[in-house]
Image (cartoon, coloured by chain):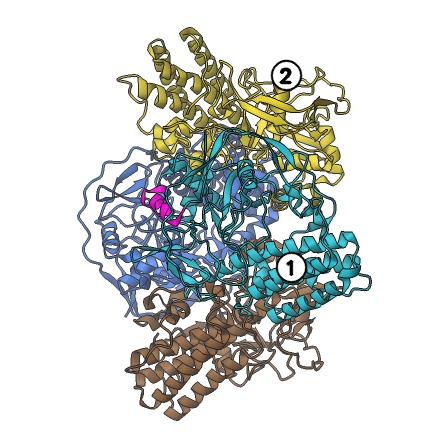
Chain colours: A brown, B cyan, C yellow, D blue
Amino acid sequence: MRTRLGLSPSSEALARRFAEVRALSVALAGPLSDADATVQSMEDASPAKWHLAHITWFFETFVLRDFVPGYRLYDDRFPFLFNSYYEAEGRRHARGRRGMLTRPTLDEVLGYRAYVDAAVEAALPDLPHEARELVRLGCHHEEQHQELLLTDILHLMSENPIEPALWPGARKVPVEMPGPLGWIESAGGLFEIGHDDPHFAFDCEGPRHQALLTPHALADRTITNGEWAAFIADGGYKDPRHWLSDGWAWVKAEGVAAPLYWEQREGVWTRFGLDGRRPIDPAAPVTHVSLFEADAYASWAGLRLPTEIEWEAAAALHDDMTGNQLDGAGPVEPRPSSAGPAFYGDVWEWTGSAYRPYPGFRAADGAVGEYNGKFMSGQFVLRGGSCATPRGHVRASYRNFFYPHQRWQFTGVRLAKDL
Amino acid sequence: MRTRLGLSPSSEALARRFAEVRALSVALAGPLSDADATVQSMEDASPAKWHLAHITWFFETFVLRDFVPGYRLYDDRFPFLFNSYYEAEGRRHARGRRGMLTRPTLDEVLGYRAYVDAAVEAALPDLPHEARELVRLGCHHEEQHQELLLTDILHLMSENPIEPALWPGARKVPVEMPGPLGWIESAGGLFEIGHDDPHFAFDCEGPRHQALLTPHALADRTITNGEWAAFIADGGYKDPRHWLSDGWAWVKAEGVAAPLYWEQREGVWTRFGLDGRRPIDPAAPVTHVSLFEADAYASWAGLRLPTEIEWEAAAALHDDMTGNQLDGAGPVEPRPSSAGPAFYGDVWEWTGSAYRPYPGFRAADGAVGEYNGKFMSGQFVLRGGSCATPRGHVRASYRNFFYPHQRWQFTGVRLAKDL
Amino acid sequence: MRTRLGLSPSSEALARRFAEVRALSVALAGPLSDADATVQSMEDASPAKWHLAHITWFFETFVLRDFVPGYRLYDDRFPFLFNSYYEAEGRRHARGRRGMLTRPTLDEVLGYRAYVDAAVEAALPDLPHEARELVRLGCHHEEQHQELLLTDILHLMSENPIEPALWPGARKVPVEMPGPLGWIESAGGLFEIGHDDPHFAFDCEGPRHQALLTPHALADRTITNGEWAAFIADGGYKDPRHWLSDGWAWVKAEGVAAPLYWEQREGVWTRFGLDGRRPIDPAAPVTHVSLFEADAYASWAGLRLPTEIEWEAAAALHDDMTGNQLDGAGPVEPRPSSAGPAFYGDVWEWTGSAYRPYPGFRAADGAVGEYNGKFMSGQFVLRGGSCATPRGHVRASYRNFFYPHQRWQFTGVRLAKDL
Amino acid sequence: MRTRLGLSPSSEALARRFAEVRALSVALAGPLSDADATVQSMEDASPAKWHLAHITWFFETFVLRDFVPGYRLYDDRFPFLFNSYYEAEGRRHARGRRGMLTRPTLDEVLGYRAYVDAAVEAALPDLPHEARELVRLGCHHEEQHQELLLTDILHLMSENPIEPALWPGARKVPVEMPGPLGWIESAGGLFEIGHDDPHFAFDCEGPRHQALLTPHALADRTITNGEWAAFIADGGYKDPRHWLSDGWAWVKAEGVAAPLYWEQREGVWTRFGLDGRRPIDPAAPVTHVSLFEADAYASWAGLRLPTEIEWEAAAALHDDMTGNQLDGAGPVEPRPSSAGPAFYGDVWEWTGSAYRPYPGFRAADGAVGEYNGKFMSGQFVLRGGSCATPRGHVRASYRNFFYPHQRWQFTGVRLAKDL
């Protein structure tokens, strides 16, 4: 993987960062039993244990194996088990069978983590620049998996008829309903887009380049649960005219009639979360909707989704607009905010942009080069980060991407319109 | 379920039997982690935890709920989770999603068992005859699940690329290869078939009735691994002429080329078992073959499989011919025997008989009546019991049944011929 | 294929028989357009054109190629296209893609027929006995395909929303409703079963052997459409207790709620047939029901299906009880009869017997030996013949067989009970 | 559907255009038998008869039914059968079952065409402007289906093992191999993109808008069969590093190893076409490759695909660069050209642009508004037209679109690079 040029942190700062990131992953797994950490609830998701091991394998392979002479693998069999999609790194265990790995146990995987952590910490002061960049990359990679670990474990819990609450929920503080959508207008014109500051970024965020925008406006907040309930009540899921053709086929094939994890119980819309099943909060941002649903909502509203360029141009001007992000282990969920429009946090915002390379993009050579470029077909870009995104992980140029039917991430909707 | 008429054991004997059966199930789960006990490796198999809970649910439902006034369910949600196929007992959790139940944990399920065991033991002295019959039935039902628990957990372990050995294996004592097949001849004629003695039997084992046999002979032992390797070496899996049409389609679709769990490693045939992967023992009975494979082998050998009537008539005359059965927790596997022909134990023997009702059979009313009759399409009968069948569970009239492609049970082959 | 020993007809008689059989196939295809004759409506069915060519390929291959020196194949490519399941005869076109063969056209296939017919007719007087037996077998084989041609084309027409009527229907003569079921009783005992008379039979009909029957009774007629409508009205398709487990899974997966081709139109049950869609005739035998449905009906009625041995024993005593069979091209359908119980014709009667070999059965060597034995898993036996079975094709020993979910043949239900 | 504003042709010109377009469709169906015109070879394709009827239904519905008082439908059942994806027009026959329609016959569909043609011709002089626009749209719509008819029938013929040649092939004139790729360079900057001239265009081609391009170059011709054979020989289909992740999954799942219709026969690459199977012409443009293959080829070559904006900017400057297009019924295929770079014709050129709306695009209301916008997820844009595209149908702004795995159209590859 080729990352964008950046300032390298000092050894100490890097060691501190490494320790913090590694500790958070373990904390997130805190409430999990061995079984919770083992089962795979669908092919898109991975077991928590697998996440914990895979992000460790990344450091072991690309840092310790490649840069630390005499390093001995913790277990010869783990590279086969915990490689994910790096074809260049050789054979790997089929993605859909990750849930079969009852052994090694969660405790053994935590032992693997401790072994690799100690080795990385010992090696850090003497690592060459290239290896330190890989440590830095590994921390960002681990942060991505922290979010996936949370959303995957939520999906698993939702498949259990007894709907376990993983964390006791925080007390809900009632919040006023937000007012009608306001609009952040832009006259358009030429904008600089993509990563170029001295800090870390993934390869797909660049090269920085000029882009041309037409006059448009973005909503000053995301759509709420209450607004979504109105869409449902108006028959939004039953009228093919609102839907993309593939979206309508998906609605019919899957019987989709509400966001993922929503159920109507005695006439009340509830949602399942990491704190169990509870009534929806009408003031909070809607989440667990697919691109198909986001697009249908926009179509129903007579509006559209923003492009990723429009989004980035606006967010770059509002770097301080930060909502609810992941600050530590606990039952994350999008929260209503009285603090004004947030571009970062709460929910990933579907854009109308297909995930494709920027002008001048080229994938790097070698195994790490497989990182992002090869996923550039069939997926849409999301921007902004969610309540499950580790704080500090996102930035204006960050490009997340999922298929248009996927919705087990904390995904939501910001509307846009032409001026 | 309607069982055949039988002598009822005394309260004490029944309590002792109940305690022994219940204890063996827990012992079998001894080496399992919470995760091992939770994961479902295929739709045909169930998690060990599910087996442990389901057989407990049987006692709780049909004995405690129905016959013990004031009994309180251990957990209201368990009947939904742990009912299996009793449609009359209401909604149940989808079979293919049993592996999602990371909660309740294995420890919680063991707590459920202890609660129900105590209640049954307290109630036993005062239970009416009908309820005691159900306790007795529940013990037989639990023995069936003990065998399934072992074969399901073996399948799960086999799906893990690191191939965990659940139990340390016993030391292998080399045994002489058995000689050529001998034949047990029968002049045919009228035989009494089916259950009628005073002991327990499942409903499908009766009514006892006369059956007419033509002159024939049964092999005096089952086919060995060594003989099976010769079938493979002769191209047995590559020649459609040996195979039933559905069997050949299965071979091609699944790429079948050897018994389940066999792999050739550096030119040597190995098999995976509860004690890990080891070379096959050429003198031991071949196992983990499907009816399709058993029939193809017989066809290749110019012989045929026995009918279930032929088998029962012969076995009734040789009630002492007992091989390796389940006597306690450990790494069961079929063993070669120098002790002469065994009809009971080591491997279930595929017969050429479709599983259909005997003349005069009628399913009982009520939920328990769903027990056997409704499975009477598409399956074949197996006879004799295996190394994983609890000792004392089988008898000459016992009818086991599986689909012709299934082979994760300890299934083997005895040949027959017309005279 | 090995057929039962039989008297060979004279050359003249055989030539006459060959000509008649061959002519009827062409007549059955009379109302078909080139497209009608080409399309395959499901994998179980074959295009009419394919039937016409395949039964011709049988004569060309096993008679002309093998016994007529100097015979030249009509077209080198046809053996690949029109072989069906004879693995020994080499590669063949995938069954599910038979509908892709828009070329050769129907006219070209009729040309192929004429070429082969002429060659067989010219060769007949000089053919050795073995070849003449194969001509005789080919005629019976063709009669089987005549029935399939009719049922396959009916299925295809039913897939067309405009529901074409292939033949103008005969005028319906109102018939009195049959009275309540009467019973043909049998005291049981030893019976001779299977083929042994001097006439033709398929290999699976023998060897003739003794069978033992318990006291029982067979209904004196099959179940009517009117009786079936009562089963539906009583919720028969909605209550799992009536159904085999695999049957209930099939009902739910396929949404089955009535016999194939039945639809309720403005409150009236109608059926689709070769003469288009019409109201059901309540007095006529119900048809297009699966074994699963037949078994559920019997279970609902508190009765059971006959075994094939019971059926044959009764039918052998009533060889004159003949109903509606195929006498020429036209819109066949089961008809009500005031003429007393018919064992032959109108509908194939599902038995409760799995299709397995008789004692002493052995498949013949060579390609023709693949004929019947290899289908002996998973299927049930039907007896008696239908309105689409060429008159003269059936006999008491005839064993037809289909999978328990299949119902596009003219299949119906005769009940039985134990005495 | 909303089309871009345009000059309306005179009545006479429109009548002439209508007559020509309608006649070409019938001519294309000339060599088809009734069966050829009926069978559907895969869900993506439609039967020729269906195309001929569907494009007729378009005129009948949106022109005659809506604008001609007293018009009587040719057949009440046809709207259900021949609607395609217009949800607003009500229920329609399932796409995957179009091949079941053996009735109406090809002759009857030609009768339907004649009836509608006569009615349109009679009505034309008096139609209001809106209806005349719909006739114009219908002609373009029919031209789209002419191309699909050819590619669908080619696919059907390819499924027949005897590989019928639909048209006798033209004599092949040997052509010199093209030289190495040359490059058409662009300094980038602002360009006007999208439709705005007075002629017809589909709604998705606008609004015309400014777009910003970076410096780049486009190849001056498309990739040839000879060049593609070198990619295969170099292991292009076996190295995951060249492939998009979804593309690699597709290659493995489908066993893809060459362009569609290619087969190696005795060491020689051949292709199947409307004139049968022949050796590939190494000098001709490669065709029947998917976006996945096109992208992998570019990646292997160290280059990339053009964006649709780059393509349009270049093509707008070279409106005269026209290759082989559809001028009449016959065995179309891409041809080598010595006449310099062609932007139009021979093969559709995959671009790296996802099919998404232009800035300011809004779908029109009503049934025709479903035309293009709802397909804007998951598909990629192709530009330029092919040998099967009716001459005059394409223009610089034309946006064709298919899923990245589809390749039964005449699709090819032009490379690009950054400067």
Whether A219 is among the magenta residues is no
Question: Secondary structure under badge 1?
Answer: helix
Task: Provide the residue span drawn in magenta.
Answer: B224-236
- Let me know if residue D103 appears in the view: yes
- Corner quadrant of residue C117: top left
Disc 2 target residue: C317
For the residue pair B359 and A100, the one nearer the viewer reads as: B359
Disc 1 target residue: B54
For the residue pair B100 and D397, the one nearer the viewer reads as: B100
Q: Is residue D287 above or below residue C30?
A: below
Residue C364's disc is: none
Question: Residue D323, percent across and down?
Answer: 29, 48
- Let me know if residue B81 appears in the view: no
Disc 1: which chain?
Answer: B
Whether B231 is among the magenta residues is yes
Distance from disc 1 to disc 2, alpha carbons, whole Å, reads 52 Å
Question: Secondary structure under badge 2?
Answer: helix
Q: How many numbered dots are placed on residues in this image?
A: 2
Question: Residue B368, percent across and down?
Answer: 71, 49
- Corner quadrant of residue B24: bottom right
